[in-house]
């Protein structure tokens, strides 16, 4: 087979990720990681398809050294990068472009030792009182609603962006996500409390004056179209930086507070309230980890009751 270009490889890989049902955010992260690796290879006059078979493992090992030399110290960043490369080369092997994907073998041999020596990074969690003050510091109604929904439901950013108005039910205060849209999520039904209900109803009344005819997205831009994930990220970090819990100039994950931090706070608050691991995992939409989880079926009436008794009130006004 003639050698294919790096651009062609990346285009094919993106299409493969879409077919797999991976989220927009995951595809962006994977693509960026692959492009970083491509630039490294090109600097050595090599190409993506050259990483084929164990005789080329030195390219991956040199890339690890390159990342360390350029200040990458977090194991999680290494792991995400090599997860992306493993998916890329797994696909290229499947598609017959290369003969052997070696990324997983090289990662196992090298990243374990790196993990032991790396300082653990923890995402910032703020307590209920501080979260209450933060939410009430947000002046914009839509942004306040977005942040409240995130911390009350544990939704991911791409899940929030994709929400349509008709997926919100005020009969039982629930959200039902689109089936088959999200690669990582299992449970598609989650709940919100009366505090969130009041905010959502206020926002929906305001939304009628903004949204373009035919626009179904729950959250929209000032021009009336669907608010995409990048827009959500920008709005959240604008307010978290203003409140003093997000430092955009820091390279430490502990100094950041982004959309994903709400998911960590959501999990922490429920655990502190005594909710079981199985119920928290169900609300988060996590995949089953053990045989017990696969055969254990949760009653959603009990789940909703447990949620409402565990989720904290932030006195959002």
Image: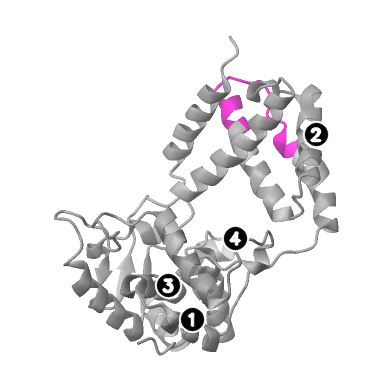
Q: Which mark is residue 289?
A: 4
Sequence-first disc among 2 and 3: 2
The 10 Å Cα crowd at callout 1, few under 14, some 14 to 19, many 20 or more, is many
The residue beneath circle 1 is: 134
Is 253 included in the stretch rendered in magenta?
no
**Residue assigned mark 2:** 62
- Which label number is shown at residue 147? 3
Q: Secondary structure at mark 3?
A: helix
Range of residues picked out in magenta? 89-105
| Gap in angstroms between the C-alphas marked 4 and 3 | 29 Å
In this rendering, is residue 291 above or below 181?
A: below
- Percent position (x, y) of residue 258? 53, 65
Which numbered disc covers residue 160?
A: none
Judged left or right of residue 161, residue 73 is: right
Q: Is residue 23 visible?
A: no
> Which one is closest to the eye, mark 4 or mark 1?
1
Depth order, front residue of 198/143: 143
Which numbered disc, 1 or 3, marks the residue closer to the eye? 1
State the residue in front, 50 or 179: 50
Q: Nearer the viewer, residue 168 or 125?
A: 125
Tell me if label 4 and label 3 are in contact, CB under 8 Å: no
Q: CA distance from mark 1 to mark 2?
A: 44 Å
Q: CA distance from mark 2 to mark 4?
A: 34 Å
Disc 1 and disc 3 in contact, CB within 8 angstroms = yes
């Amino acid at each position: 087979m003639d050698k294919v270009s790096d651009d062609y490889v990346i285009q094919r890989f993106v299409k493969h990720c879409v077919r797999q049902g991976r989220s927009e955010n995951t595809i962006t992260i994977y693509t960026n990681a692959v492009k970083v690796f491509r630039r490294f290879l090109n600097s050595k006059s090599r190409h993506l398809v050259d990483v084929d078979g164990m005789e080329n493992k030195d390219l991956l090992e040199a890339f690890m050294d390159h990342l360390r030399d350029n200040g990458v110290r977090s194991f999680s960043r290494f792991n995400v990068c090599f997860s992306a490369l493993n998916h890329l080369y797994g696909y290229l092997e499947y598609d017959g472009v290369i003969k052997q994907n070696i990324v997983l073998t090289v990662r196992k041999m090298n990243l374990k030792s790196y993990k032991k020596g790396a300082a653990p990074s923890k995402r910032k969690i703020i307590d209920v009182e501080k979260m209450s003050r933060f939410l009430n510091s947000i002046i914009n109604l839509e942004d306040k609603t977005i942040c409240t929904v995130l911390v009350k439901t544990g939704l991911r950013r791409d899940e929030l962006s994709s929400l349509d108005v008709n997926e919100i039910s005020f009969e039982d205060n629930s959200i039902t996500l689109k089936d088959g849209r999200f690669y990582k999520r299992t449970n598609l039904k989650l709940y919100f409390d009366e505090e969130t209900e009041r905010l959502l109803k206020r926002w929906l009344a305001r939304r009628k004056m903004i949204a373009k005819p035919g626009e179904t997205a729950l959250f929209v831009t000032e021009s009336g179209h669907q608010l995409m994930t990048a827009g959500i990220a920008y709005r959240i970090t604008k307010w978290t930086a203003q409140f003093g819990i997000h430092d955009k100039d820091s390279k430490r994950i502990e100094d950041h507070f982004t959309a994903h931090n709400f998911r960590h706070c959501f999990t922490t608050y429920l655990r502190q309230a005594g909710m079981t691991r199985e119920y928290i995992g169900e609300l988060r939409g996590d995949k089953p980890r053990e045989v017990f989880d696969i055969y254990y079926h949760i009653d959603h009436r009990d789940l909703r009751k447990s949620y409402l008794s565990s989720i904290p009130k932030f006195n959002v006004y």
